[in-house]
Amino acid sequence: MPAGRIGTHRRPHAELPRYTLKEYAPLIDSSNLHPSHWNAMVEDIAANYADYDGFVVIHGSDTLAYTASALSFMLENLAKPVIVTGSMVPLCEHPNDAEQNLLDAFHWACESNLHEVCVAFNRLLLRGNRSRKLWGAEMGAFGSPNYPILGRVQGHHEFNPALCLPRPGAPFRMHRINAELTVAGLKLYPGFSVRLIERMLADGPAGLVLESYGAGNAPDADAALLAALRQASERGTVLVNITQCMSGKVAMESYAAGSALARAGLVSGWDMTPEAALAKLYFLLSLKPGVLGPEDLLPVSLRGELTAV
């Protein structure tokens, strides 16, 4: 059963299972999402994990992919579905996509062979940390550019278990993140100001997601940019390189412009989405120090967020 307000059990629709609703207060526009909200979500899921077959998170669409990515890392050894959904048109307006998205999310949340965080939107089931909001006004706003869809509704709900994460063999664990960490994002573009980048990195962010060109390239003739990145890396900022292309992966060894970033201390994010890369940085930087550090784990697929090499 999907989770919600503890103690309020409902079944208002014939197609819905019995569920419990929890409404957060105050309700926020998803544009106001903060990493601390992810901690509240995972704490509620963990507190009720043994009592429900699955969980549905109803979320505004603008930052939905960030939340789906973050929850995937924070919920380790997940043996039940956690389905994140929303809509482009509110439930109070007609026609809307909210009702169908909710019905689909509740269905997938009861699927016993699904063991990961997913997004249910526009009759599709997507891996949460592979999802992106690709269109700003279309009902089919979400896609999964670098990974096949997990399922779809074509008369009935169907999904491909071979594309899904296997059932974990270890016990479920919840992780909180340090919501006070500073994790920055930077998108390269022709004419960017190196001075702005130098000032940003001088503040010592814990991590930086760099959206570079193509297969992970940056202007290798810009000595000031490379020096700023190298110095930030030496000061302890974890730098991850992802492509700003909608689909594709980083291969820094393919071009001189990419290998220059590798020498400056950047770690390849392979084919992670920007949302997944940022969420993964928050997660890894919040872990207690271990044998493997963030730089070691960034290129490793932890929850199916990147394609293993």
Image (tube, rainbow, N blue to C red):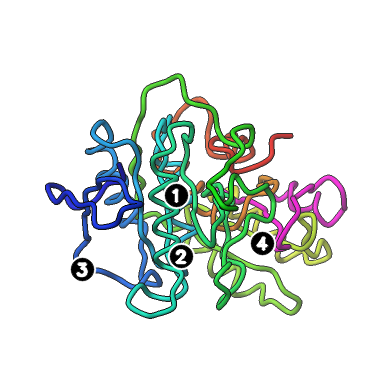
Left or right, 198 with reference to 51: right
- Which residue: 61% across, 38% down? 160
Q: Which mark is residue 63?
A: 2
Residue named by callout 4: 211
Q: Earlier in the sequence, mark 4 or mark 1?
A: 1
Picture quarter with the N terminus: top left
Which residue type carries mark 3? Pro
Q: How far is mark 4 from mark 3, CA to CA?
A: 33 Å
4 vs 2, front mark: 2
Secondary element at tag 2: loop
Left or right, 11 with reference to 35: left
**239 inside magenta stretch:** yes
Mark 1 surroundings within 10 Å by alpha-carbon count, few (fewer than 14), some (14 through 19), many (20 or more): many
Q: Position of residue 185 (x, y in %)?
A: 56, 63
For the residue pair 87 and 194, the one nearer the viewer reads as 87
Which residue type carries mark 1? Ala
Q: How far is mark 3 from mark 1, CA to CA?
A: 21 Å
Q: Earlier in the sequence, mark 2 or mark 3?
A: 3
Q: Earlier in the sequence, mark 2 or mark 1?
A: 2
Q: How far is mark 4 from mark 2, CA to CA?
A: 18 Å
Q: Which mark is residue 26?
A: 3
Which residue type carries mark 2? Thr
- Which residue: 76% across, 54% down? 248
Residue range corresponding to the magenta coloring: 238-265
Q: Earlier in the sequence, mark 3 or mark 1?
A: 3
Q: Position of residue 272 (x, y in %)?
A: 63, 50
Q: Which mark is residue 70?
A: 1
Mark 2 surroundings within 10 Å by alpha-carbon count, few (fewer than 14), some (14 through 19), many (20 or more): some
